[in-house]
């Protein structure tokens, strides 16, 4: 269950990053701001939520491999 949820969150994170890049290109290169600006802002919020979900789902791995702590400590 957790691994399936993590896969979904990771896929949505990738889509979110691509959408952020596309909206930046639309705004900076093509000078279009209305819809891309709104999409960029709302996708930024979604990205933040997805990032937090990703960290929560990966916390045991982060704790063990990055922080160097085991579950027993």
Image (cartoon, rainbow, N blue to C red):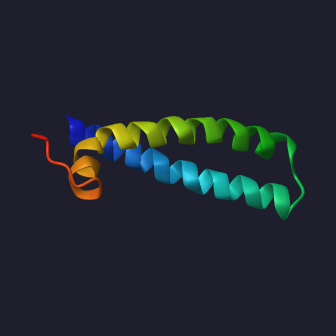
**Quadrant including the C terminus:** top left
Give the x, y percent position of residue 5. Answer: 30, 37
Residue 1 lies left or right of residue 47; in this view the side is left
**Residue occupying the far left of the picture:** 72
User: Which residue: 28% across, 53% down?
Assistant: 67
Nearer to us in this view, 48 or 62: 62
Give the x, y percent position of residue 2. Answer: 22, 37
| Figure quadrant of residue 4 | top left
User: Which residue: 29% across, 57% down?
Assistant: 66
**Residue occupying the far bottom of the picture:** 29
**Residue occupying the far right of the picture:** 31
Residue 22 lies left or right of residue 73; in this view the side is right
User: Which residue: 48% across, 54% down?
Assistant: 14
Residue 44 lies left or right of residue 64; in this view the side is right
User: Which residue: 71% across, 44% down?
Assistant: 40
Give the x, y percent position of residue 21. Answer: 66, 58
**Quadrant including the N terminus:** top left
**Residue occupying the far front of the picture:** 73
Residue 41 lies left or right of residue 56; in this view the side is right
């Amino acid at each position: 269950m957790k691994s399936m949820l993590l896969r979904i969150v990771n896929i949505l994170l990738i889509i979110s990053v691509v959408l952020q890049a596309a909206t930046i290109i639309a705004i900076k290169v093509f000078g279009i701001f209305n819809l891309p600006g709104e999409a960029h802002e709302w996708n930024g919020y979604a990205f933040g939520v997805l990032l937090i979900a990703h960290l929560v789902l990966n916390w045991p791995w982060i704790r063990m491999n990055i922080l160097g702590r085991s579950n027993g400590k």
